[in-house]
């Protein structure tokens, strides 16, 4: 469950850490659940490195692309950002579906009074 909550980009880490600290979750489970932060971290690192590469003039690309170096970097950066956002959106949808299924399994069965 911790890993699924870490995948959701809408939950602030500080607030989540505080709330988990109030529960009886073990340290091992909390650390293991930190794996859920990896997709978001990887997307942020990719965006930062792409923006950094755009500002450097001596960024090396094979000579095949020398004429259109700036356009290639921008295209690859935009494609990476779109793929990253699509991946995060997909993971968020899967997580919400999984949590909804868990809630349905745990909710008490409704009794029809008629």
Image (spheres, helix red, strand yellow):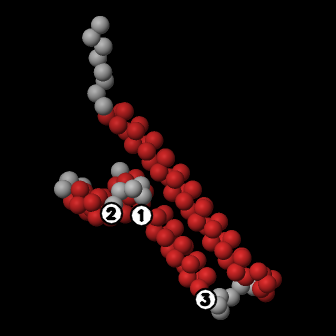
Sort mark 2 into few (<14), some (14-19) or many (20+) by Cα contacts within 10 Å.
few
Residue matched to label 2: 13
Q: CA distance from mark 1 to mark 2?
A: 9 Å
Residue 69 vertical placement versus 96 (above, below): below
Query: Would you identify the image quadrant in which residue 113 lies?
Result: top left
Tags 1 and 2 in contact by the CB under 8 Å rule? yes
Q: In the image shown, does 101 or 32 lie closer to the viewer?
A: 101
Q: Which mark is residue 55?
A: none
Residue 99 visible in image: yes
**At which x and y percent is residue 101?**
41, 37
Residue matched to label 1: 37
Q: Earlier in the sequence, mark 2 or mark 3?
A: 2
Sort mark 3 into few (<14), some (14-19) or many (20+) by Cα contacts within 10 Å.
few
Sort mark 1 into few (<14), some (14-19) or many (20+) by Cα contacts within 10 Å.
some
State left or right for residue 71 relative to residue 93.
right
State left or right for residue 11 relative to residue 90.
left
Q: CA distance from mark 2 to mark 3?
A: 32 Å
Question: Mark 2 falls on what kind of element?
Answer: helix
Q: Earlier in the sequence, mark 1 or mark 3?
A: 1
Q: Which mark is residue 56?
A: 3
Q: In the image shown, does 27 or 11 lie closer to the viewer?
A: 11
**At which x and y percent is residue 110?**
30, 21
Residue sitting at 29 percent across and 7 percent down?
Answer: 114
Tags 1 and 3 in contact by the CB under 8 Å rule? no
Question: Mark 1 falls on what kind of element?
Answer: helix
Residue sitting at 35 percent across and 56 percent down?
Answer: 11
């Amino acid at each position: 469950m911790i890993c699924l909550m870490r995948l959701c980009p809408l939950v602030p880490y500080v607030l989540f850490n505080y709330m988990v600290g109030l529960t009886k979750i073990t340290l091992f489970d909390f650390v293991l659940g930190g794996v859920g932060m990896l997709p978001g971290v990887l997307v942020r690192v990719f965006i930062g490195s792409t923006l950094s590469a755009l500002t450097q003039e001596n960024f090396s690309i094979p000579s095949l692309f020398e004429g259109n170096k700036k356009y290639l970097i921008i295209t690859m950066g935009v494609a990476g950002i779109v793929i990253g956002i699509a991946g995060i959106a997909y993971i968020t949808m899967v997580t919400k579906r999984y949590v909804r299924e868990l809630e349905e399994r745990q909710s008490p069965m409704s009794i029809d009074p008629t």
